[in-house]
Structures are given as C-alpha cells and as structure tokens.
C-alpha cells in the first residue's frame, strides 16, 4: 500500500453511488464514532465497503446494525465460513445483489475456496459442501422462504448433523439478520464495491 493509499484508508471518502435511492451523507458530517468505525473498516479492507456509507444515512441505526453484526460474528458457536455460507445462501434465494457479491467475497476468503460462493448463489443444494452444511442451509433457506413451516424436526436435524444448541440459535439469528439486511439493501438499492467481485478468486 502506498503512502497515499494508506492516507485514503485512514481518511476515506464515501461513494455517492453506494446506494441509488437515498442520499449518502458526507463523511465530515457524520458523528465521530461513525467516522472512526468507517476508517477502521476501510483500513482493514483497503476500501470502504458501501454498506457503511449507506447505513450512515441514519447514525442511530448504523450503530444498532453493526453492533448486532459484530455480536453475530464475535459471539458465536459457528465458524466464520459457516456464517458467510448462510449469508450467501439466504441472499441467493432473496436475490440481494449487494450481499451476494460482498459476502460471496467473504465466503471465498474464509472458506479458502474460489468456487464455493458462486455455487451457493446459483443453487446451494448442488454446491460442493458436506451433509452438515447442507442441512444448515436447508434450515436457513426454509426459515427465509417458509418461516411458518419451521418445526421441531428441523432443529432435530441440525442437532443430528452435529450442531450444538447454541449453534442452532446462531444459525437462526444470522438468517434473520441477513433477511433484514437483504430487504433494506434492495429497498435502498445498495451497490457492491467493484473490489468485492474479484476478492478471493485466486
């Protein structure tokens, strides 16, 4: 990273086209804690993921959204690649462009597999995954598409597949959160950064 790139990472600019249907606020107009979080994420990724620019439209909701996101990935019985697999399978059936692309990149990175995300988006049932993960995604997609049909047998299937009781809660929580995220991203027409398309493909 060059010196100028490092400066950009510390002092990012929010892209006006991060979402199409609502205005993206100017970075300097945001509360200090949001600017700090955006700078941290920019330094980590090398660019500012557009979800941070978009969610900054309402600072109070930005805080709540990312606090819950952080809890889901930091206090969990799931592996990070399992979390991202759920996100991509759910986003695939919801046809969420932003999350398919952004979290597809994270699947490739955390699973160390350049093909898996594309398989999950197209049809997770034919993806190269083990039986436990297929059961996990079956339940996540059922909760997404037909929540009234979820029944004790679905939880039992997850337990039989080797997931703990805590992991079952986390599977449902990740699924529910990203159904919220998908719908908000589609409503606002959030656009994924171009960088996400190529991350983790080699």
Image (spheres, rainbow, N blue to C red):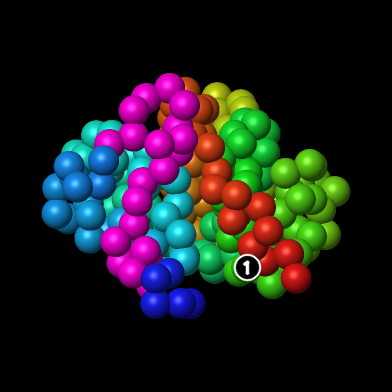
Q: Is residue 132 above or below residue 86?
A: below
> How far across and down, in percent of the image, does residue 10 sit?
31, 67
193 relative to 199 in the view: left or right:
left
* Residue 166 showing in the rendered view: no
181 relative to 162 in the view: left or right:
left
Pointer 1 residue: 109
Residue furthest to the left in view is 32
The residue under the point 25% across, 47% down is 27
Q: Residue 5 appears in which quarter of the rendering?
A: bottom left
The residue under the point 55% across, 43% down is 192
Which contiguous range is marked in magenta? 6-25
Which quarter of the rendered picture does the C terminus lie within? bottom right
The residue under the point 64% across, 62% down is 199
Please state which of residues 69 and 171 is positioned toward the viewer in this rendering: 69
Most common SS among magenta residues: loop
Label 1's element?
helix
The residue under the point 26% across, 41% down is 26
Magenta segment: does it hold 181?
no
64 relative to 171 in the view: left or right:
left
Please state which of residues 1 and 200 is positioned toward the viewer in this rendering: 1
> How far across and down, in percent of the image, does residue 56 sit?
28, 41
> How far across and down, in percent of the image, does residue 170 sit?
46, 54
* Residue 146 showing in the rendered view: yes
């Amino acid at each position: 990273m060059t010196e100028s790139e490092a400066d950009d990472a510390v002092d990012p600019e929010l892209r006006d086209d991060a979402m199409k249907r609502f205005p993206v606020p100017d970075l300097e107009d945001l509360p200090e804690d949001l600017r700090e979080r955006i700078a941290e994420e920019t330094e980590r990724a090398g660019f500012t993921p557009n979800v941070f620019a978009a969610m900054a439209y309402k600072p109070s909701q930005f805080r709540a959204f990312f606090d819950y996101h952080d809890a889901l990935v930091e206090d969990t019985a799931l592996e990070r690649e399992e979390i991202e697999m759920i996100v991509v399978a759910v986003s695939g059936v919801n046809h969420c462009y932003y999350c398919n692309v952004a979290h597809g990149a994270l699947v490739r990175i955390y699973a160390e597999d350049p093909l898996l995300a594309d398989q999950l988006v197209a049809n997770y049932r034919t993806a190269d995954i083990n039986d436990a993960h297929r059961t996990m995604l079956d339940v996540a997609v059922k909760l997404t598409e037909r929540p009234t049909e979820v029944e004790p047998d679905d939880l039992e299937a997850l337990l039989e597949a080797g997931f703990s009781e805590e992991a079952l809660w986390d599977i449902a929580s990740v699924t529910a959160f990203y159904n919220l995220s998908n719908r908000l991203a589609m409503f606002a027409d959030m656009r994924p950064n171009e960088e996400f398309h190529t991350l983790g493909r080699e």
